[in-house]
C-alpha cells in the first residue's frame, strides 16, 4: 500500500502552501486522481484520515477525490478512446501506436479553508 506515502507528500505540500498563505486551518483538500494512477481512492482516504488527524492544521479535514478518466490516443488513426475498456490496442483501427493522454494524474486541485 503506497497510499500512505502519497498522503505524507500531500500533507507536506498542503502545509507548505498553508504557511506561504498564512493559513492556520485547512478544512479540505481536493485531489485529481487518474483512473490508471495505481492509487486506490478508498485506501488514500483511509490513510488521509489517520495521518491528517495527527496534524493540527489538518485535524478533521476532508480529502475529496475527483477521478480523471483514462484516455488513450491512437497515432495510427488519430482517435481517442477509453483506456480502461480497450487497453493499448485502438478499438477503431486495432493499431498499437498508442499513448496515454490523461488518467495518470495525482495532483492537488484545491485546498479549502474554513470561512
Image (tube, rainbow, N blue to C red):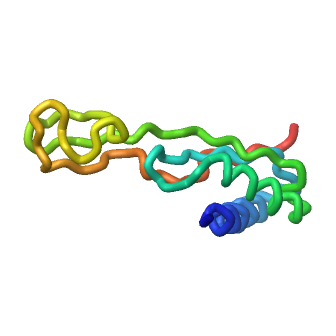
Using the image, determine if residue 104 lies above or below residue 92: below
Q: Where's the C terminus, which quadrant?
A: top right
Q: Residue at x 17, y 42 (%)?
A: 74
Using the image, determine if residue 56 lies above or below residue 35: below
Q: Position of residue 21 (x, y in %)?
A: 75, 57
Q: Position of residue 101 (x, y in %)?
A: 31, 46
Q: How many discs appear?
A: 0
Q: Residue at x 14, y 36 (%)?
A: 78
Q: Position of residue 9 (x, y in %)?
A: 65, 67
Q: Where's the N terminus, which quadrant?
A: bottom right
Q: Is residue 115 left or right of residue 64?
A: right
Q: Is residue 46 left or right of residue 73?
A: right
Q: Residue at x 80, y 63 (%)?
A: 51
Q: Position of residue 81 (x, y in %)?
A: 27, 34
Q: Tell me which corner region of the image, top left, top right, bottom left or bottom right, holds residue 24.
A: bottom right
Q: Which of 86 and 37 lies nearest the eye of the viewer?
A: 86
Q: Is residue 106 left or right of residue 110?
A: left
Q: Is residue 29 left or right of residue 103?
A: right
Q: Which of 96 and 114 lies nearest the eye of the viewer?
A: 96
Residue lying farthest to the top in this orientation: 92
Q: Residue at x 44, y 49 (%)?
A: 36
Q: Which of 25 and 6 lies nearest the eye of the viewer?
A: 6
Amino acid at each position: 500500500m503506497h497510499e500512505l506515502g502519497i498522503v505524507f507528500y500531500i500533507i507536506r505540500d498542503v502545509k507548505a502552501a498553508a504557511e506561504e498563505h498564512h493559513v492556520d486551518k485547512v478544512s479540505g483538500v481536493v485531489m485529481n486522481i487518474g483512473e490508471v494512477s495505481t492509487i486506490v481512492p478508498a485506501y488514500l482516504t483511509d490513510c488521509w484520515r489517520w495521518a491528517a488527524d495527527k496534524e493540527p492544521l489538518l485535524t478533521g479535514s476532508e480529502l475529496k477525490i475527483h477521478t480523471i478518466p483514462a484516455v488513450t490516443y491512437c497515432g495510427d488513426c488519430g482517435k481517442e478512446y477509453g483506456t480502461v475498456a480497450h487497453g493499448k490496442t485502438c478499438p477503431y483501427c486495432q493499431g498499437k501506436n498508442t499513448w496515454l493522454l490523461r488518467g495518470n494524474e495525482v495532483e492537488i486541485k484545491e485546498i479549502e479553508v474554513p470561512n
